[in-house]
Amino acid sequence: MTLRVRFAPSPTGELHVGGARTALFNWLWARKEGGSFVLRIEDTDLVRSERRFAQGIMDALRWLGLDWDELYFQSERLPIYRKYVEKLLEEGKAYPCYCTPEELAARRRQALSRGEVPEYDGHCRNLSEAERKRYLAQGRKPAIRFRVPEAAKETSFRDFLRGEVRFRRLTTGDFVIQKADGTPTYNLACVVDDHEMGITHVLRAEDHISNTPKQIWLYQALGWDPPQFGHLSVILGPDRRKLSKRHGATSVEALREQGFLPEAVVNHLALLGWSPGTGEEVFTLEELVERFSLERVNLAPQVFDLDKLKWLNRKHLARLSPEELLVRAKPFLKGLPEGPEEKVARALALVRPGISTLAELGEHPDLVAILSRPELGQDVLEELSKPMAQEALRAVLARLEGLPNVGLRALVNEVAGELGVSRRGVFHPLRLALTGRSQGPELAGVVAVLGPEEVRARIEHALSVVEETTGGV
Ligand code: GLU
Ligand code: ZN
């Protein structure tokens, strides 16, 4: 039997970290085993589902590098669900419920005030034909409920990650499988589709554990073998509370906009419940496919940690070639002076060790300083107006011809020796003249990116500005 797994998001918002983790684990498993990964958009909730969210989820999955083998929209399959609801009705395993939302809410409140479990009370379970006719005549549109035997509520199932999961008494009345508007509910559509699509294993998050018995009852009622079920651990924020919007941007889309690489996001998601068991932490998607195994999935609550993600992002940024770095950085470079691609790529590589996200590149002062001739501020001019600073710059200028052969370090050493100053006494004014800043990336790198012409021009420019402002020496 070949493995068939699925990711079944409801398009009611962006793809969040939890959903993306579920998608990734299913995808990794399928790719590892040579199975199929099915994407099923669960958009039968006409009120909350939106096409743009489905599009956004698919874009986010693609961006992460998670491709799918088959794609389904539940909204295009409504007749299939209706057919099975009909069947359950005919066999008496389901029945129409004419209660209005207001009536249900009122009876719920009463049950709660009596200290009872507020389950559906079975009001329409055994209506006579006459009662049904009367309700219909009142213009009521029935929902369809699944008949749950009381005895079934003490139940259990085998979870392929957790082992036996037991319920002393599952809190559920006869639950709705088809809403009054004729659309199926999640549990019904999910069961019909997992069966029809030949899903062998359902791997999803812990919050679906209590749905699983309901789904198994539906399989039994429809005469089908259920798939295997496994439930991943819950994801927490750094404060160890369930991850939610309160913890800031937790959608894949938001992480992308913040300048995280898909490699880093995938890497962090993978570590939310899986570990290689070797202490290694940095993996590409391909490496994850190779290493992933369900045996190494653990069920402890997992913390989604932005600092960890930043750390991983730096690791993955460091692996990019300058050309690739430029491709990834482009959307974030707005507000920066443009230059020849090759120069920009090398400048990016130069500032890369100091950044955690691509977004930090937009208007990055070190990049600005390299890509355009810097403004020399008042404090810089003051520094450069010291005679020794000017002397050092002139001495560098005089030796610039030899720079390609000697290298910057040796050249600075020579100048320092000749003038009897420290190396810093040469490096510092040079950095100020070239970038207008007293700190920044390694100076030899800056010099290499600027090239000899531009280095000369900037030093000469700095000297002349200093002369102007000090009225000549
Ligand atoms: N549409 C459901 C959700 O997004 C799918 C749950 C499942 O995997 O069965 O939570
Ligand atoms: Zn009812």
Image (cartoon, helix red, strand yellow):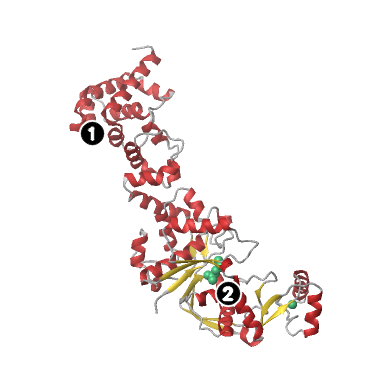
Quarter holding ligand 2: bottom right
Q: Residue at x 32, y 26 (%)?
A: 429
Q: Is ligand 1 within 8 Å of the beta carbon of the residue shown at mark 1?
A: no
The image shows a total of numbered marks equal to 2
Q: Are marks 2 and 1 in contact (CB under 8 Å)?
A: no
Q: Which residue is drawn at 58% across and 82% down?
A: 217
Q: What element carries label 2?
A: helix
Mark 1 packing: few (<14 Cα in 10 Å), some, or many (20+)? few
Is residue 126 in sight in this rendering?
Answer: yes
Residue on which the image places disc 2? 80
Q: What is the three-letter code of the residue carrying label 2?
A: Ile
Specify the quadrant of the image occupied by residue 186: bottom right
Q: What is the three-letter code of the residue carrying label 1?
A: Arg
- Residue 444 image offset from top left, x and y in percent: 28, 35
Residue on which the image places disc 1? 409
Q: Residue at x 44, y 61 (%)?
A: 269
Residue 428 to residue 189: above or below: above
Residue 253 to residue 42: above or below: above
Specify the quadrant of the image occupied by residue 362: top left
- Residue 98 image offset from top left, x and y in percent: 75, 76
- Residue 465 image offset from top left, x and y in percent: 37, 18
Q: Which residue is drawn at 48% across and 56% down?
A: 60
- Residue 470 image offset from top left, x and y in percent: 39, 14
The foreground one among 179 and 103 is 179
Q: Where does the N terminus fall, quadrant-wise?
A: bottom left
Q: How far apart are marks 2 and 1 (CA)?
A: 75 Å
Q: Is mark 1 on a helix, strand or loop?
A: helix
